Image: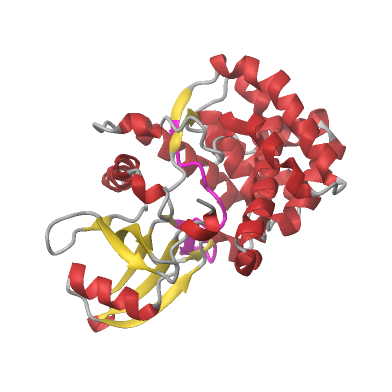
Amino acid sequence: MSSNQSKPRLSEPQVAEIVQRLYGLTLSSVRALPSYDDQNFQLEADRGARFVLKVMNSVDSQNQNLIEVQTHAMTFLHQHGLPVQTVLSTTAGELMSLEEIDCGNGCQKYLVRLLTYLPGITISTVAVTPKLLYETGKIAARMDKVLQEMDHPHVNALQRENFIWSLSNIPLLENYLCFMDGAPLQNIVKAVIDQYKTCVVPKRCTFRKSINHGDFNDLNMLVEEDQTNGYKISGILDFSDMSSGYYVYELAITIMYMMIENPRPVEVGGPILAGWESEIPLNEEERDALYLLVLSRFSQSLLLAQHAVSQQPENEEYLMTTAKTGKRILCQLWELGKEEVEKTWFQMAAQYADWE
């Protein structure tokens, strides 16, 4: 089933009916939020109480064990002091409900969850300082350290063997190169995939294993003003891409996405790396692979966005959010080369090493 067919498309009246029936809430407003494969809504109920309704796509909704683990992870992180949403129970005491809904293409089954609302604005909308980048790297590492302690009967569901968004599956991107349709960037992406196979795959046995959030991007992080007229991290959103991986994957993903809106993207890696290593210092092989892993995530994001647009042309603006500047940054990183980029990252990281 294509992503176009599996993505839910509930109307506001359908949302209001589901929330009333499952949670006993009468809504005063429903606002659709941007989404990739799922459908998310910000809800306001009586006396101004706010929530987020997450409706999973029909394909992922079939894997209830995976979603149970993701739901448990959110609670586990919240209990350990990280600013994440938690899932609210239905009036029947369930954390999720599999609903049969007709979104215009016949009835399909979608898993529905109601989440707590977190205050703040996305980090993509503020001027990000080196200090905030340091804190971003630090909280990403803390999150993965806590997740590594988590236990759950279905934790093996995170072994998502052919999950296309896993950095372990970069070679699978060769099947998507055709969606670049001969664009100049296609040669760079192909070269990144080839280098990944020869330079990263043999080293993966030396990387330390972890559970990854997998989508630690500038739209999934919330910030709010602090007492110094700067910003502090107030929320971590969207655990749908969680999978088993390696610590260095999370770091690479974080660096890549925080480059997108930054006017000096190459310099982003330094303070993030310093924040990360204040919690989890990299080993030699992880450090050597970091540059290529960041380029691999850019390639992944660009190719899969191009593919998604072919499936959901009406959602092109959101799907291509990263691609707009991502193409330029990938070219810049490639042209600078590994040695030059690493020099920038590692020298800057050393400057921020004692920044607490």
- Looking at the image, which residue sits at the far front? 106
- Tell me if residue 15 comes above or below residue 83 in the rendering: below
On screen, residue 53 above or below 290: below
Question: Residue 306: image x %, image y %?
Answer: 69, 53
* Residue depicted at x 35% and y 82%: 29
Q: Residue furthest left?
A: 92
Q: Is residue 248 magenta?
A: no
**Left or right of 278 on screen, residue 150:** left
Where is residue 77 drawn, in percent x and y?
Answer: 32, 44
Q: Nearer the viewer, residue 100 or 47?
A: 100
Residue 96 found in image quarter: bottom left
From the viewer's side, name the closer residue of 144 and 203.
Answer: 203
Q: Nearer the viewer, residue 256 or 55?
A: 55
Which residue: 80% across, 51% down? 328
The picture places residue 202, in percent across and down from the top left corner, at 64, 15
Q: Nearer the viewer, residue 271 or 216?
A: 216
In this view, 108 is above or below 163: below
> From this viewpoint, is residue 288 visible?
no
Q: Is residue 189 above or below residue 9?
A: above
Q: Is residue 307 left or right of residue 204?
A: right
- Taking the image as shown, residue 348 lies to the left or right of residue 121, namely right
The residues colored magenta run: 211-234
Residue 137 seen from this side: yes
